[in-house]
Amino acid sequence: MSDLKPITGQTKLFGIFGHPVAHTLSPFMHNAAFDAVGLPYRYVPFEVPPDRLEGAVKGILPLGIRGVNVTIPHKEAILPFLDQVDEEAKMIGAVNTVEVISGRLIGHNTDGRGFLESLFEMKVALSGKRVILLGAGGAARAVAAVLAQQSIAEMVIVARTAARGKALADRLAAISPGLKVSLRGADWSSPLPADPDRSTLLINTTPLGMKQEDPLPFPIHLIDSRWSVADLIYRPAETALLAAAKRAGSQVIPGLGMLLHQGVLAFEIWTGQKAPLSVMRQALQNALSFQDFRSH
Ligand code: NAP
């Protein structure tokens, strides 16, 4: 862990609203980034229970807080408390970054583009791809909304709760009317549609894989060596799904990339400066190995 510059009378505050928030890695990457570019800013976690969200948001301006991230369970609930929400956050239906401009609170969502950046960084080509999206929750919505605007061939949504899957499919139809979207349950007794080009991007957006005892979110014998397999989970850094995909010879995209790039985009919104990418990546990797060390 690096030593941070001292807090002084000039220090400005940023943070993250969540519940629970104790395990967030965002302070590590943002504080390292502020120090690296010489900004007198600090980023702290705020434990905000749902019934305190409105009060916490109302406190942003009087306390002089310059910007916040928003995480579980507040990404949708915060919408009515903001002065403005940008087009991307409206399209996703959730906010993960709040910017303060001239006394107004502006909502953004950098999750989807953060995921996209993590794919681009790994040189995953999206054109003509079939995307299999496991899960239909908040993160799935952000990821699916930005992917629907790329030149993918089709999206298969795999949802345990049919109503949630249908709501996501309807949202995608509105965002990208020409996109072929199909919906299926999370039981794998019926076969997957054929994939003659073997050009599939499989994305796990469920929490299955966070715990060692979790079942796999997808029947791994179906994974082909020409697939790309992404997992949004970043702790553990390599889930059982990614380990299996690697064994099958597929390209794998770990969740840390999305966490990093959504943070990079938030930093750039708040500061108007280019984010120090390698500093932020290193800070996240250090924080993860530090936490792994402490939990053993
Ligand atoms: P969420 O809104 O609760 O959605 C979770 C989705 O997974 C829902 O569709 C849920 O189905 C499904 N699901 C949960 N347990 C399941 C199970 N046992 N079998 C099948 N489906 C199951 O959560 P979220 O905010 O989208 O987060 C999902 C994951 O993404 C978490 O692991 C989170 O840490 C990760 N994430 C990572 C990043 C990053 O930067 N890398 C960013 C955001 C989220 P139901 O609707 O039936 O409950």
Image: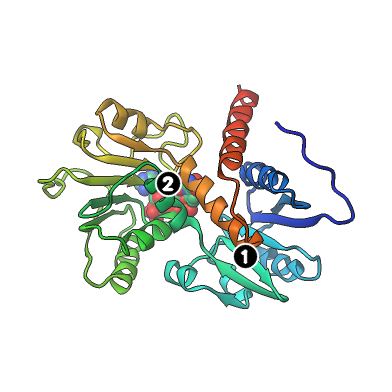
The amino acid beneath tag 2 is Ser
User: In the picture provided, is 265 more to the left or to the right than 83?
Assistant: left
Is the residue marked by circle 2 packed among few (<14), some (14-19), or many (20+) residues within 10 Å? many
The residue identified by callout 2 is 118
On screen, residue 163 versus residue 12, left or right, reads left
Q: Nearer the viewer, mark 1 or mark 2?
A: 2
Q: Quadrant of the N terminus?
A: top right
Q: Position of residue 148 (x, y in %)?
A: 31, 62
Q: Residue at horizontal 27%, vertical 33%?
A: 250
Q: Nearer the viewer, residue 12 or 157?
A: 12
Is 98 on the left-hand or right-hand side of 46? left
Residue 199 relative to residue 22: left or right: left
* Three-letter amino acid code at the position of disc 1: Val
- Per the model, the C-alpha gap separating discs 1 and 2 is 22 Å
Mark 1: secondary structure: strand
Question: What residue is at 48 percent from the left and 32 percent from the top?
Answer: 236
Relative depth, front residue between 217 and 283:
283
Q: Which residue is mark 1?
A: 98
Q: Is residue 238 above or below residue 145?
A: above
Q: Quadrant of residue 107?
A: bottom right
Helix, strand or loop status at disc 2: helix
In the displayed structure, 98 sits above or below 238; it is below
Residue 295, x across and y down, in percent? 62, 26
Q: From this view, report whether residue 95 is shown above or below residue 224.
A: below
* Quadrant housing residue 224: top left
- Is there any visible trace of residue 77 in the rendered image? no
> Label 2 near label 1: C-beta < 8 Å?
no
**The image quarter in which residue 278 lies:** top right
Looking at the rendered image, the quarter that the C terminus falls into is top right
